[in-house]
């Protein structure tokens, strides 16, 4: 009997609001893709939780849906790749695999007071030096400390050496392997605030600072290692290797084929996440950007600088839902094109404050320059321009940290389909923007990582050849106009 050819990658993209499964072949053709959303839990103001059982159920549903019960497809899966929401913290029993509590999501702010206390004690310098991160509730360490101190089931399981902690990737690996593997990799580990980005291991000083026992932590493997093999998963044969894992933003960096130092990507989602490949060197930012691990493949470790605009696509959602100026998010471009300029209207999208390089946590969104002649088209255009101008400041800070100009920026995410936004972004940056044919680059990064793990692609050169561009946006704005936009933006931000 002829042996079935194993030529497909099953990618699991586990996000904040839903889980997507994709079946992809070597030519990057998506044979099937399905997404299932799950509950968002808000027990108290500032608290955000997920039920790990909901996440696992959505994962199983997505896998079943893309396979459609066809053994002819499942038998062709050569490997599984995983990408995931980062920093979200899960706790489960090693012996039973059952969740000990709800997962504490990256958005959760319950440990803000603890972070403030540690800052007042002068501990942020240690965190920045060892972990490359800011001392912030966003990251996992204080979530773990809080759970150990406040959730009896977690505390008791840790005392009896039955507690397993992990970010979502670790939880999925544990479930996919029927408890055989408790593992993670550096791109996710580097977001916990417990991991030393130089030694590439859990850091004893940070574990001590946050009172986290090493025994609850997963093993850290390379990003394309074998993390385990499937066992007892409905619709999947046993023995499929899990061969690639990356946190979602690092996965998008690889999915954009930003494999060389100086290449950058911007993912336009609810917020805008910008990562700049810094190669084998850790760049310590002068603007409080984050230094993080992009991936580790074999002996090669790749680092990145990361900056985020807290609000991007969320501004468009507000225009749609809050002001009712449009019915669908995609309509904002047509509305904005009804005018040739914003006519002096500036919008600063600071609904949740402003991050790097300004660091104005108490700032709030505002329009400036509104007159009686201002129309909803001017406001729509100002919103798109505000997203681009916020990204401008982050990217210029990255250039200053890198010590060289950014030659091009790869763009992805839902709002990257907005041609007006992309052109304005190119103009204010005075930099070429490149949009790929496949804008689901987070999942594509998981595909590439798994494919590298099993040798489907032999190296980064193959990744670069596989990646295909859709459109290039070249700067065309006169220098004087660019400076006028940037000066007006700077004045607006200074008033917040």
Image (cartoon, rainbow, N blue to C red):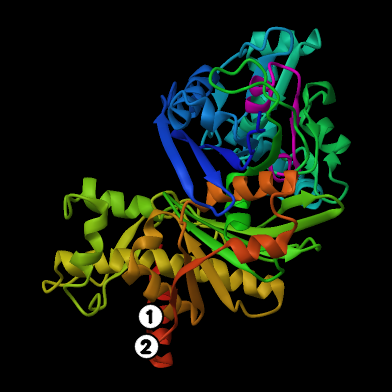
Q: Residue at x 45, y 62 (%)?
A: 437
Q: Is residue 217 above or below residue 118?
A: above
Q: Residues within 10 Å of mark 2 (few under 14, many from 20)?
A: few
Q: In this view, does 80 lie above or below 149?
A: below
Q: What stretch is highlighted in magenta?
A: 172-190
Front-most of 311 and 205? 311
| In the image, residue 187 lies in the stretch drawn in magenta | yes
Q: Where does the image place residue 424, in percent across and percent down from the top left?
A: 38, 75
* Res. 472 in view: yes
Q: Is residue 319 left or right of residue 469?
A: left
Badge 1 element: helix
Q: Is residue 123 left or right of residue 100?
A: right
C-beta proximity under 8 Å, tags 2 and 1: yes
Q: Residue at x 67, y 47 (%)?
A: 451
Q: In which quarter of the image is residue 419?
A: bottom left
Q: Residue at x 26, y 69 (%)?
A: 381
Q: In which quarter of the image is residue 208?
A: top right
Q: Where does the image place residue 369, in percent across and percent down from the top left?
A: 25, 72
Q: In this view, does 297 lie to the left or right of 341?
A: right
* Res. 289 in view: no
Q: Quadrant of the N terminus?
A: top right
Query: Residue 436, which numbered label?
Result: none
Q: Mark 1 points at which residue?
A: 485
Q: Name the residue under label 2.
A: 481
Q: In which quarter of the image is the C terminus?
A: bottom left
Q: How crowded is mark 1: few (under 14 residues within 10 Å), some or many (20 or more)?
A: some
Mark 2 to mark 1: distance in Å? 6 Å
Q: Where does the image place residue 251, in percent across and percent down from the top left?
A: 61, 50
Front-most of 420 and 141? 420
């Amino acid at each position: 009997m002829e042996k079935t050819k194993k030529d497909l990658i099953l990618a699991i993209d586990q996000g904040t609001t839903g889980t997507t499964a994709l079946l992809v072949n070597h030519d990057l053709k998506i044979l099937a893709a399905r997404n299932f959303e799950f509950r968002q839990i808000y027990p108290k103001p500032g608290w955000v939780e997920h039920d790990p059982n909901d996440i696992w159920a959505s994962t199983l549903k997505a896998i079943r849906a893309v396979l459609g019960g066809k053994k002819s497809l499942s038998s062709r899966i050569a490997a599984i790749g995983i990408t995931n929401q980062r920093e979200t913290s899960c706790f489960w029993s090693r012996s039973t695999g059952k969740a000990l509590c709800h997962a504490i999501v990256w958005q959760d702010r319950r440990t803000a007071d603890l972070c403030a206390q540690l800052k007042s004690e002068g501990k942020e310098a240690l965190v920045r030096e060892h972990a490359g991160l800011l001392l912030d509730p966003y990251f996992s360490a204080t979530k773990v400390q809080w759970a150990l101190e406040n959730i009896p089931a977690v505390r008791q399981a840790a005392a009896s050496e039955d507690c397993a902690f992990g970010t979502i990737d670790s939880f999925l690996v544990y479930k996919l392997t029927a408890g055989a593997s408790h593992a993670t990799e550096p791109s996710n580990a580097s977001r916990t605030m417990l991991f030393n980005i130089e030694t590439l291991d859990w850091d004893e000083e940070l574990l001590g600072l946050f009172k986290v026992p090493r025994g609850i932590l997963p093993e850290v493997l390379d990003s394309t290692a074998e993390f385990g093999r499937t066992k007892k998963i409905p619709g999947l044969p046993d023995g499929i290797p899990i061969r690639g894992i990356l946190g979602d933003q690092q996965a998008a960096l690889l999915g954009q084929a930003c494999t060389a130092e100086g290449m950058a990507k911007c993912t336009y989602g609810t917020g805008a996440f910008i990562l700049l490949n810094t190669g084998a060197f850790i760049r310590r930012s002068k603007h409080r950007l984050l230094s993080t691990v992009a991936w580790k493949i074999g002996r090669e470790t790749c680092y990145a600088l990361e900056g985020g605009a807290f609000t991007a696509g969320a501004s468009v959602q507000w225009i749609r839902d809050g002001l009712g100026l449009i019915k669908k998010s995609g309509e904002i471009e047509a509305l904005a094109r009804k005018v040739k300029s914003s006519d002096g209207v500036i919008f600063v999208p600071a609904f949740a404050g402003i991050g790097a390089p300004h660091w104005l946590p108490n700032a709030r969104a505002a329009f400036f320059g509104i007159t009686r002649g201002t129309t909803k088209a001017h406001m729509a255009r100002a919103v798109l321009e505000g997203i681009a101008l916020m990204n401008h400041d982050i990217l210029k800070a990255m250039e200053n940290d890198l010590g060289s100009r950014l030659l091009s920026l790869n763009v992805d995410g839902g709002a990257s389909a907005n041609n007006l936004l992309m052109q304005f972004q190119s103009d204010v940056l005075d930099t070429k923007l490149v949009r790929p044919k496949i804008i689901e680059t987070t999942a594509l990064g998981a595909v590439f990582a798994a494919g590298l793990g099993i040798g489907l692609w032999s190296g980064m050169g193959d990744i670069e050849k596989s990646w295909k561009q859709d459109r290039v946006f070249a700067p065309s704005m006169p220098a004087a106009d660019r400076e006028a936009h940037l000066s007006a933006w700077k004045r607006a931000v200074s008033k917040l």
